[in-house]
Every structure is written in structure tokens, then in C-alpha cells.
Image (cartoon, rainbow, N blue to C red):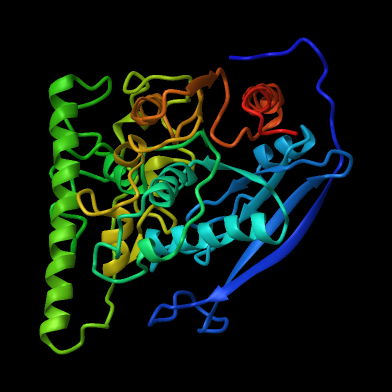
Amino acid sequence: MTTSTQVPVRHDYDRIPYLIAFQNNSSVRDVYGGIAETVFLESHLLRPKDKPSDTVLVFMHPIGGGAYLPMMNGLARAGHHVIYCNSRFRGTDSALLMEKVVEDLGACIKDAKDRLGYEKVVLAGWSGGGSLSVFYQQQAQRPTITASPSGDGPDLTALELVPADGLMLLAAHISRHGTLTEWLDASILDENDPTRRDPELDLYNPDNPNQPPYNTEFLDRYRAAQVARNRRISQWVKEKLAELKAAGRPDDEYGFVVHGTMADPRWLDPAVDPNDRAPGTCYLGDPQVVNNGAVGLARFCTLRSWLSQWSYDDAHADGVRCGADIAVPTLVIGNLADDACTPSHTHRLFEAIGHPDKEMHQIPGANHYYSGPDQRDTLRAATEVCTDWLHRHGFSL
């Protein structure tokens, strides 16, 4: 980890909100409200007042909401120009298609270059934005995806996506579908009745004979059951889409609930994918409560969105699979007290990147968001790593 003995220069910056608008080519309305024929992306430009630059760092998360996170402010105070652009699915992912998020990210990058005048763009993938950024860069370099897994648009080969000049993957996980699968409650036997459970796989059942610390045999069984559950849901989704098509309603959608999506053994056993996180907690609070709460991953879904976002075998936005094609310098940062994106994700992303100019740094004591009064030093350390890497690669002029 790169550190500095000098007090870093702090820059004042302007936060400039703006909109990016472009034609909606989808046959359906993507989000509630607004004008059906137009996509609007709410964006923030954080621009240091006394430090011009030809480079901008572009952040996007599939469901947004990170414009005020400590890292965005920290990078701007360090003198970097930062854009945080929300996708069209800001705050809700029930109908989200990752391919449409790629379209949104492409519109943001084109606007940053054509209207705002930046010569270089570094994609900064935070958390769920990491696999999005890798997927985007792969398709911008050599587009191959002509539709989402359900057969709907957009055709990424027709969008003329502009490749970024570098990648930063910050506290990122491998993919939304991979992360969800690792968090699925493997004990649920019936999607229509989540109370029907295998007691030997129920992590939150005190009578379960398998208790932390978990042995390898149990973990292997549990992980296999998670993948099997994801595949059962995907198979049902495909059958439902076929049923709608056979009924002469090929454009119809169908909403459903996925129960039990916050049951990762990591949260109960700190020896599983070990780091400095506190056992018995997750980034949303008590995992047993969140497991069936209203805000868990993939809680409310639609058929097409499940295949694009959450399906273990069908989703395209996979940081590991896409990483091999990356042809630009890449920085990977993991936070060693992160209870959402644990070390195995950091290492898998780093190892997957195909470009030889890649670096990995880990920040001791840092939680997922650098949130809390004890996180100022970890935020500063992470910002210094980013600044050093950007300077060495000519991205901060």
C-alpha cells in the first residue's frame, strides 16, 4: 500500500449537477415516471476549483446513489475531476437490464468527452460498479453482445461505445449474479413458500447441527445448494417467458419476489474468506433480519431483469469472464474490513484482468464505504493509492 508522510493538499471543488438525455429506443418504459421517449441520467461533476485536468474519473453503479460517498469527495479534494452518473434505474433494480446500464454509461462517457471536453476517461467501478465497468470496457473495446439474455435490446454492437483509458476497481465484487448466488439462502426448498427449509442448511436455525466455524464439507454442500437454487429460479423464469410467448403475449412481464437473499456463511464465520470484518453483521445490518427484509438483493424482480442481472449462468456482466479481455491499465483496491466485497472477490478480479499493467492494493481497517469517524485514515490511504497510480499513468494532468 502506498502511503505518504506529507500532508496531502486539499482542493476546494464545485459540485455541479447536470442531466444527460438521449433517445429511448426501448419498446417499453424502463422506469416509473418521466418521458417514455427519453432517457435522463442524473449526474454530478465534482470539479476542483484550482486544478484543471484533461482526465475525468467516471463512476456509475447499476442502481446509483453513490454521488455523496466519502470516496467521491475524497478524490475531488485530492484534485481529481470526478463524474458520478446515475443510471436510468436510480434506486430501483426490479426491471434493470445490465445491457441498458452499459448504454447509459456509454452516453455519460461520450458526454464527458464531447461536451465537457475531457480527453481521457478512467472508469472507476465502485462496489457493484466494478463488474459493470469491466463489462462496459470489454464491450467498448470489441462489442459482441447483441441483446440481453432474454433476447431483448439493446444491441451493444450498434452503440459505438467509447473505451475508457484506464480502470479503477474499488471495493468491488465479481458480479451482481455471482454475489447474489453467494448470498442466497440455500435452505429454501420452495420459492412459493420460503418457510419450507432444509434445517441442515438453515444458517439462522439454532437447531442446525452445522454451526460456525463451518467445516469444508458443509461449505461445499452449501455453495452447491446456492448455485442449484439460482438455477431453479432461472429455469422457472425461462419457462414463464416461454409461456407468455406461447399465449401470444411476448412483450408481457411478470413480477415476483425472491426470499432469503442474505445468508452468506461469511457473515457468521469470520474464518470464511477472512478479513477484519466484524462477525454477525453485514453491510445492511443484522443478516438474519435482512435475509427476508424489504431491501435485500433481488428481492423484487421481473423475468427479463433476473436473467440479465441475477442468473448465475445467463448474465453477461461478469467481472471475471470479461476481465480477460481488458486492454488498459487497471488498479484494484480491496478494503480489509469490508463485509460486502471480501478478499476473494478482490483477488478474483485482479487475477482475471488480462492487461499486464495491473496493480492490487489492500487497505487495512477499511470498511466498504469508508464510513465512520475511525475511517478517515483509511479513506486517505485509499485516495493516496489512487492518486499515485493516476499520476504514474499520466491520468492526472
- Of the pair 338 and 269, the residue shown nearer to us: 338
Quarter that holds the N terminus:
top right
Residue displayed at 25% across by 36% down:
203
Q: Position of residue 290 (x, y in %)?
A: 41, 48
Residue displayed at 70% across by 25% down:
380
**Residue, far bottom:** 248
Quarter that holds the C terminus:
top right
Q: Is residue 93 above or below residue 171?
A: below
Q: Is residue 343 left or right of residue 145?
A: right
Q: Is residue 6 above or below residue 99?
A: above
Q: Position of residue 312 (x, y in %)?
A: 23, 48
Q: Is residue 288 left or right of residue 232?
A: right
Q: Is residue 389 left or right of residue 105?
A: right
Q: Is residue 44 above or below residue 390?
A: below
Please identify the quarter of the rendering in which residue 383 is found.
top right
Q: Position of residue 181 (x, y in %)?
A: 27, 44
**Tally of numbered discs:** 0
Residue displayed at 18% across by 33% down:
208
Q: Position of residue 300 (x, y in %)?
A: 36, 64
- Of the pair 33 and 119, the residue shown nearer to us: 119
Residue displayed at 13% across by 44% down:
198
Please identify the quarter of the rendering in which residue 53 is found.
top right
Please identify the quarter of the rendering in which residue 30 is found.
bottom left
Q: Is residue 365 left or right of residue 154?
A: right
**Residue, far top:** 5
